[in-house]
């Protein structure tokens, strides 16, 4: 059963995995501390808080080393290497913390060596057990998709491609007998007129969830079969809701307008808006001050690397379609669009300068946008600002595209951390799917999650 954490759904076993590893790290360090103590049965609150600090820093480093990405397949040796890397960074960060706050330290080298060995040993065993559970599909909830349209197909692909989603596609109940290209070799295809016998079929297979993603509901909705499923203890979910829960995005191409109107979300309380603006001011002002040396060094580098201005400004469409000027460090040659006209930026763009490639990959080119945030034209987190030239075209092609202008554009955002550079209408559509998910579930907690994921993106060197 999935749990909703910071506006995202996670399988319960994923939560257990992360919490369980935290308990293992804590228990390993605590056991070593008690082993080396002169009074092993004593209780010391301060020591426990210090161990909690070690656990927290260690888990943050494990997260940034992608060891909580259950979709990744690591060999035994790579798992050990990543754990060692995580503990190495943990040691560096804790050393800095101990240097600044001497009272938070734990003690001698023997304690460190034994703690490291214990953490590696028990975390390695824990990860291997989790990987075995994933590979064998233990605790997966059997799911049946009702429908044969494009939304149903995308849901099926989402379940099959995400081995950590907590679901397994057991069957598909088709609307038409001609389309049997769903799922994989383990998926059972069910096709009966008006889906008769659906409940009995689902119970026979041990189905726990039925996802309704019918292509055409006007030709007849299977009310009675679905009611029998619901009364029989089988969860029945609407396709758009399940897709949102599964992928962390919406699907504007196949979304039912009624679902969008009646679904929860898109709430903008005055308190939430006040807290968001306060966070924007604190973050933008603080970062402009802290990053001043980086800003100065970058300005010199851009000037020396190629001819042209240090900063690049361009008109973008903001909240309520208000036009404003965005600021960045120049990462392209001067007059990059003189011959081509307005075109989308893309990976490996030959207009990008040498220093510009580094600035884009590290996101340093985005720092001047903090000034836009401070002025109130942008937010720290929000949809990526787009040019009016592209907006006019995209609104005619992509459904609900104008909805993104109900929020302030952001320096970073859900689409930026989940998807790469967009260089086509398909890319713009996919980014809108993520932007609408963000606006539907917008909160301070989600903003903080996006900031953490942005830091991870920058550290990993994957510019988005």
Image: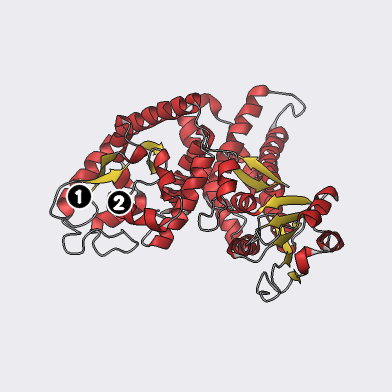
Q: For the image shown, how many numbered marks are present on the structure?
A: 2
Give the residue at the far front of this rendering: 219
Question: Quarter of the image holding residue 215?
Answer: bottom right
State left or right for residue 317 relative to residue 92: left
Answer whether residue 155 is visible to the viewer in this image.
Answer: yes
Residue 214 image offset from top left, x and y in percent: 66, 60
Badge 1: few (under 14), some or many (20 or more) residues near its Cα, within 10 Å?
A: many
| Residue at x-position 21% and y-position 60% | 341
In the image, residue 184 above or below residue 268: below
> Where on the picture, by quarter, is residue 343?
bottom left
3D distance between C-alphas at marks 2 and 1: 9 Å
* Residue receiving disc 1: 302
User: Residue 328, position in %: x, y?
Assistant: 26, 45
Q: Is residue 171 above or below residue 46?
A: below
Q: Classify mark 2: helix, strand or loop.
A: helix
Q: Nearer the viewer, residue 284 or 156?
A: 156
CB-based contact (under 8 Å), mark 2 and mark 1: yes
| Label 1: element kind | helix
- Residue identified by numbered label 2: 359
Categorize mark 2 by other alpha carbons within 10 Å: few (<14), some (14-19), many (20+): many
Q: In this view of the protein, can residue 290 be seen by the observer?
A: no
Q: Nearer the viewer, residue 178 or 171?
A: 178
Relative vertical location of residue 49 with respect to residue 357 in this rendering, above or below: above
């Amino acid at each position: 059963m999935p749990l909703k954490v910071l506006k995202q759904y996670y399988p319960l076993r994923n939560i257990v995995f992360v919490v369980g590893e935290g308990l293992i790290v804590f228990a390993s360090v605590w056991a070593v501390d008690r082993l080396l103590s002169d009074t092993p049965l004593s209780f010391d609150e301060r020591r426990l808080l210090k161990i909690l600090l070690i656990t927290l820093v260690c888990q943050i480093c494990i997260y940034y080393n992608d060891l909580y990405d259950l979709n990744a397949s690591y060999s035994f040796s790579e798992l050990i290497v990543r754990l060692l890397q995580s503990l190495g960074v943990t040691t560096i960060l804790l050393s800095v913390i101990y240097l600044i706050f001497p009272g938070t330290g734990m003690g001698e080298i023997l304690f460190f060596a034994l703690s490291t060995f214990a953490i590696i040993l028990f975390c390695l065993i824990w990860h291997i057990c989790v990987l075995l559970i994933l590979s064998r599909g233990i605790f997966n909830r059997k799911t049946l998709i009702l429908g044969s349209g494009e939304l149903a197909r995308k849901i099926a692909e989402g379940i099959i491609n995400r081995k950590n989603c907590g679901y397994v596609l057991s069957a598909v109940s088709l609307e038409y007998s001609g389309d049997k290209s769903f799922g994989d070799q383990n998926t059972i295809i069910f096709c009966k007129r008006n889906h008769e016998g659906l409940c009995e079929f689902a119970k026979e297979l041990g189905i726990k969830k039925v996802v309704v993603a019918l292509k055409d509901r006007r030709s007849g909705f299977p009310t009675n079969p679905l009611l029998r499923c619901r009364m029989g203890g089988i969860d029945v979910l609407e396709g758009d809701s399940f897709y949102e829960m599964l992928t962390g995005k919406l699907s504007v191409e196949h979304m039912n307008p009624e679902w969008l109107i009646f679904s929860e979300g898109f709430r903008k309380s005055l308190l939430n808006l006040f807290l968001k603006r306060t966070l924007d001011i604190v973050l933008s002002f603080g970062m402009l001050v802290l990053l001043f040396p980086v800003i100065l060094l970058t300005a010199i580098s851009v000037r020396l690397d190629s001819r042209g201005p240090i900063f690049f400004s361009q008109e973008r469409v903001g909240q309520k379609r208000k036009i404003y000027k965005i600021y960045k460090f120049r990462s392209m040659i001067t007059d990059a669009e003189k011959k081509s006209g307005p075109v989308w930026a893309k990976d490996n763009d030959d207009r990008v300068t040498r220093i510009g490639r580094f600035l884009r990959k590290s996101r340093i080119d985005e720092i001047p946008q903090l000034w836009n945030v401070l002025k109130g034209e942008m937010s720290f987190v929000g949809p990526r600002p787009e040019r009016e030239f592209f907006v006019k075209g995209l609104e005619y092609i992509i459904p609900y595209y104008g909805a993104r202008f109900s929020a302030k554009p952001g320096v970073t955002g859900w689409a930026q951390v989940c998807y790469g550079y967009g260089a086509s209408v398909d890319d713009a559509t996919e980014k809108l799917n993520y932007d609408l998910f963000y606006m539907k579930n917008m909160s301070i907690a989600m903003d903080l999650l996006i900031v953490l994921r942005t830091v991870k993106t920058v550290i990993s060197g994957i510019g988005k």
